Amino acid sequence: MRIRRTVLAAAIGVVSALATVVAAAPQASAHGAMVSIGSRTFLCYEDGLTSSGQEIPQNPACQAATATSGVVPLYNWFAVGNRTANGGKAGVIPDGKLCSGNSNYYDFSGFDQARSDWPITHLTAGSTITVKYNKWAAHPGTFNLYITKDGWDSTRPLTWADLESVPFSTATNPPSVGDSGSASSYYYWTATLPANKTGNHIIFSQWVRSDSTENFLGCSDVKFDGGNGNVTGIGAGAPPPPTSTPCTASYAVTSTWPGGFQAQVTVSNPSTSAMTGWTVGWTVAEGETVTSSWNGTLTQAGSLATVKAANWNNQLAAGGTTNFGFTATYNGTPPVPTSVSCQSP
């Protein structure tokens, strides 16, 4: 089932592998993203599916995005929506928030980051391509594709001023294939890419519903280098992830009872300088469900659990430690994860 594989993709490199998904998170209300030319959220999801033997994202930008926004964006890659955008541009979706759509569904802010290592689709300027836009749910409306101007500042999050003022492709109520609620269903139309573009750019997509004020938005990173739509930066072609992290985490079961247990995780800063911010992740055993937590913000998506620092314990001095705890249901002897990873921005 595709959605179960989607959950498997929702990791940021904080664990070495994901176990079988045993729970699904609530579905979003938003309903689509570009799959060809793939959006950041979609290609990060694909990265997890194509990473050889691991089924977790290997791309560092995808990992950084989820470190900021949590695991939700990777299994709700189609949910970058804004209920009140109403086709608006500057002032409606703020500058620097275009790639996340300033979403009022979930936190996609991690995908606004200006980085050079996002998955890239390689294109040829002036060529004709078939655009595919996922339809997790079908809606009437118009699709607009914008391209960044020559000389845009790629070191800063995308702004409206960075985009050409007129979309290079527009399609109203295009044909579609497949049933809604599937990663393989999509709208499609033919588009001619802008001529005389070279190097790296962003294609900003906007799906403006005609039956409501809701819009779906996203960023696709492209490079005009004579390519034919091939994608690099995912799976075996992803840039290598960081080889080390500045924090460590140790996991211990502190008490048990029939049908449940309590655990504590100690977070340490082994470096010689202060550390700000940390995220700990581990794979939850099959049949285990976390029921409460403290001293951190916990998110569980299928078999992946992550805890981000609370406001009061996100800073650790050199050699400093802090801890968080949780309770969980489990029948039998509570298993200790083989890998508990810690990352700091």
Image (spheres, helix red, strand yellow):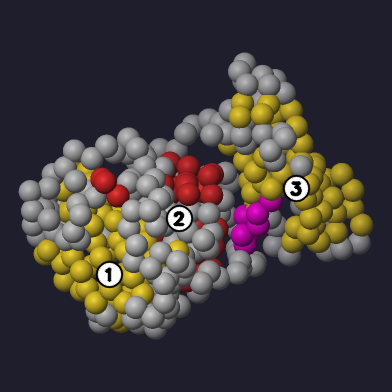
For the residues marked 2 and 3, what is the alpha-carbon distance in whole angstroms?
38 Å
Residue 121: x and y in percent read: 25, 53
Q: Which residues are magenta?
A: 298-304
For the residues marked 1 and 3, what is the alpha-carbon distance in whole angstroms?
48 Å
| Quarter of the figure with residue 49 | bottom left
Q: Nearer the viewer, mark 1 or mark 3?
A: 1
Q: Amino acid at mark 1?
A: Phe
Residue 143, numbered circle: 1
Q: Nearer the viewer, mark 2 or mark 3?
A: 2
Figure check: 113 above or below 121: above
Name the element at disc 1: strand
Residue 158: x and y in percent read: 33, 45
Q: Amino acid at mark 3?
A: Val
At 82% across and 53% down in the image, what residue appears?
Answer: 327
Q: Decide if residue 78 is in sight here.
A: no
User: Which quadrant holds the C terminus?
Assistant: top right
Residue 336, numbered circle: 3
* Nearest to N terminus: mark 2 or mark 3: 2
Question: Which residue bears the numbered disc 2?
Answer: 102
